Amino acid sequence: MDILLIGAPGAGKGTQAEKLSQLLALRHIASGDLFHKAFEDQTELGLKARSYVDLGELVPDEITIPMVIRHIEEPESVQGVVLDGFPRTLAQAQALNEELGRLTRQIDLAIHLKVSREELLQRLSGRYFCQANQHVYHTKFRPPKVADRCDVDGSKLYQRPDDAGEAMRRRLVIYFNQTTQVLDYYREQRKLRVVDGNQSIDQVQNMLMNEINDYMSREAKA
Ligand SMILES: [Zn+2]
């Protein structure tokens, strides 16, 4: 089963995708993590991607598409994947469809985690990551036990440059502009489900599982 989560930066996609991948034994592929890892490894694609991310701009398709597809083709992805942060554009959605088709796979469900703009601004501006493993914290919703330190590994917390100020606002504008077409694409294929992402992490998790279970029981009957 291949699932994708569509949601704005700050919608909680990463957290939810991680939980889903554990519950369903699917591989979690987050485009943001791929960019970050490629940057840490100092690969050419990674360095290029970083320059866009820091400005709050969308990483171009010619960098993003090959990076994600390569991971979908790996043996660890054979049971299925939960895609998070990809596809962001119609071109990416079409390229993904083509590549999955080549592997005789397809996106089974595209789930839109819908969160209001006001809520997103509030969530993003308080978000921090740990330097060692990118664990996510929030000054208000999920504060660390010790200030500025990760609960899990003790590494220092930092704010991503694109989570603050003008870069963050630009990121949201780009997101809303691009996503309409992606949502339409999956709606036309009757694969789109919408979940209210303004709720708590657990509530959202339950709603996501309801949608997935509903899909699976329909498939079993078909
Ligand atoms: Zn950590």
Image: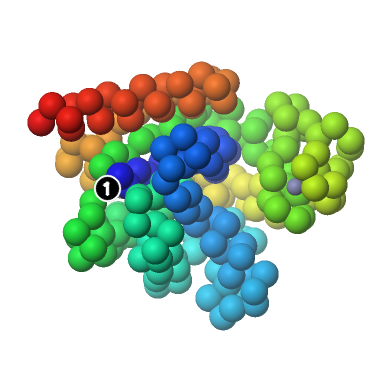
Q: Residue at the location (47% across, 53% down)?
A: 29
With respect to residue 145, does 80 lie above or below? below
For badge 1, the amino acid type reads Ile
- The correct choice, above or below, for 38 with respect to 86 in the image is below
How many numbered tags mark residues here?
1
- Image quarter where the C terminus lies is top left
Farthest-out residue, left: 222
- Residue drawn at 59 percent across, 70 percent down: 38
Position of residue 184 measured from the top left corner of the image (x, y, whole percent): 25, 41
**Colour mapping used in the image:** rainbow
Q: Is residue 210 above or below residue 159?
A: above
Q: Quadrant of residue 152?
A: top right
Q: Is residue 219 left or right of residue 18?
A: left
Q: Nearer the viewer, residue 31 or 101?
A: 101
**Residue 72 position in % (x across, y down):** 38, 61
Q: Position of residue 18 (x, y in %)?
A: 53, 41
Is the CB of the residue bearing disc 1 within 8 angstroms of ligand 1?
no
The answer to whether 188 is drawn above or below residue 98 in the figure is above
Nearer to the camera, 1 or 46: 1
- Local packing at callout 1 (Cα closer than 10 Å; few below 14, some 14-19, many 20+) is many
Secondary structure found at label 1: loop
Residue 179: % across, % down: 37, 45
Q: Nearer the viewer, residue 187 or 40?
A: 40
Q: Residue extending furthest bottom? A: 44
Does the image show residue 183? no
Locate the N terminus and report the quarter of the image it occupies. Answer: top left
> Which residue in the rendered view is the most extreme toward the right?
146
Instruction: Name the quadrant containing residue 39.
Output: bottom right
Name the residue carrying label 1: 107
Q: Residue at x 81, y 34 (%)?
A: 144
Q: Is residue 96 visible?
A: yes
Q: Residue at x 55, y 69 (%)?
A: 49
